Amino acid sequence: MATGGDNDNDGAAAVGAPKKKQRVGSNSRLSSSLAVNDSFSEGNPAESHHKPPAIPRSSSHSMFPVSSSSTACGFNDPATGDVILSLCLDRQSSPFGCLEVPSESSSLPTLEQPVTQIYLHSRVLCRSKYFSALLSDRWRQRNDTSSSNHAESSQKSNRFHLVVPATTESMSHHLTVLKLLYSDDLLSSLDSVSTALNLLPVALELLFEDCIKACVKFLEAVPWSEDEEKKILNLIPFLSEEESKELLARMSPLKNDSSEEMLHGLILAAIHNHSKMAFAKAFVAKLLRDFSSRESARRVLDTAFDKIFSVVKQSLEEYSSPVFTGDHNETEAIQRLNLHTAMINGKHLLWLMERMIELRVADTAAKAWSQQTSFTGDLQRALRDDAWWNIVPSLPSVVLRCTCRLANAMVAGNILADRQVRMDLVRDWLPVLITCKDSVSPMGPNHKSLYLELEETFLRIISTLPISDAQELLQQCLSFSTRSMDDCPHLVAAFTTWFRRANRPPKPGCDE
């Protein structure tokens, strides 16, 4: 016997493995099967071109309507069933299987697997558009005319053969969906995502709209594992746009920059809004390390850096050049607030710089930090005022650590900064370092270690500059030796290197 699934492999799909999107609004598999059944019933293969129109999938059904007849008869009841459906496993069939309608004189094909025969009711089967088409008046009339004696047709004149793919528990899933044709509460039969994913392809095969809606409704409302999500993605092409809308919204972003928006929001939340800030920052740092797109991480960090840096600069500008008037207490309160804001956001800025250096995306931040003549001027004015010491004693340490992180990254090659950027960084921030050394008293061991590290790093950056630029900057570094000659071997080494280079004879044709 011919099968009805030979022409439909492109349109069918099993759970987790659809390969081609089926056009919504038609069912090529059903059309193909009915064409074969038509020619078989007429006994004339030449008439196989008489195909019924493809059955559209509609989303206009009310949710789970059940006819009164479905409750008056039972599933697999030989006494009342007027449809005999034979199911068998066929490893050669398409994943969705196919239906065949043998004529009364035909026998079932020889099958490798035992046949499961069940008795169903045509009035119930019409809940499935697939069976509704096969049981329509047009097909009844065609089948009746193939019989020489219409009066001899028995009540059980409708005999169908369903080929079931030989996949795991495929027979059980098909039988379950057929039983659900008799149910008025489909959602109660769905107890897990796995169940819904097993039944949905069969419901799609049989065009059982109520079952499709129930499976989709269940999947929309519950969590999925990663493997289950992949299976749902593979089933999406077989659903209508309306049916798949909620599922897709859960799995696919509405815009391309959703990941960047999320990262930016997480950074700001970890910095400003989370009570356990250290843990939140550590968590976001891990997300940034694991993020797949380095360029996206760069854009997110650059945006956050610009936003927080602007707050620091504005706070110090308002502290250094106040434009408000009022009584002394109010003025002092505002000034304290400005310093406190600069201090808090300076710590956030240091954390951001560390993340950028870690991901090797700190180039933009280094350039911005090196071009801050106005900001470093405000900072020096603030540090010369003794008021900051009682309000934000760690402010010098924070701003110098930011500078030190960037400078060390340049020296290590993590940041490949242009010559002008390297020179500007030392030129603008060297005076801040000198002011901090002069203003912080007594100088604790932590400060001394930081100052010494930044001095050495500045001198190493100066060694990367042309002799003329290095000459200008080295003269400003004499303050490194104000404590003791024994404290500045790095300065001695820097001058030794400069004089060695300066005393080297110029190459012919080079103008010094």
Image (cartoon, grey):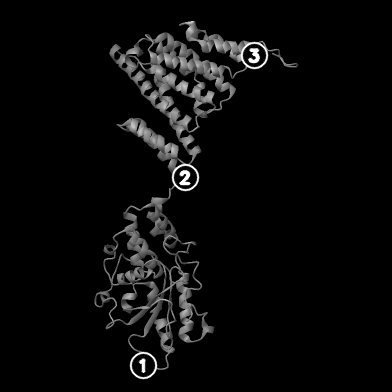
Residue 476 drawn at (x, y percent): 53, 10
Q: Going by the picture, which residue comes out furthest to the right? A: 508
Residue 258 drawn at (x, y percent): 43, 43
Q: Label 3: how many residues lie within 10 Å, few (<14), some (14-19) or many (20+)?
A: few
Which amino acid does the dot numbered 2 rest on? Asn
Q: Are marks 2 and 1 in contact (CB under 8 Å)?
A: no
Q: Label 2: how many residues lie within 10 Å, few (<14), some (14-19) or many (20+)?
A: few
Q: Residue shown at 35%/53% (left/top)?
A: 224
Could you tell whether 402 is left or right of 66 in the image? right
Q: Mark 2 points at which residue?
A: 256
Q: Mark 1 points at which residue?
A: 152
Q: Residue shown at 36%/63% (left/top)?
A: 198
Which amino acid does the dot numbered 1 rest on? Glu
**Quick one: 246 or 364, which is closer to the camera?**
364
Query: Of label 2 and label 1, which has the lower sequence position?
Result: 1
Q: Label 1: how many residues lie within 10 Å, few (<14), some (14-19) or many (20+)?
A: few
Q: State the SS at label 2.
A: loop
Q: Residue shown at 32%/82% (left/top)?
A: 82
Q: State the SS at label 1.
A: helix
**Quick one: 139 or 231, which is closer to the camera?**
231
Which amino acid does the dot numbered 3 rest on? Arg
Could you tell whether 74 is left or right of 262 in the image? left
Dot in front, 1 or 3:
3
Q: Mark 3 points at which residue?
A: 501
| C-alpha gap between disc 2 and disc 1 | 67 Å
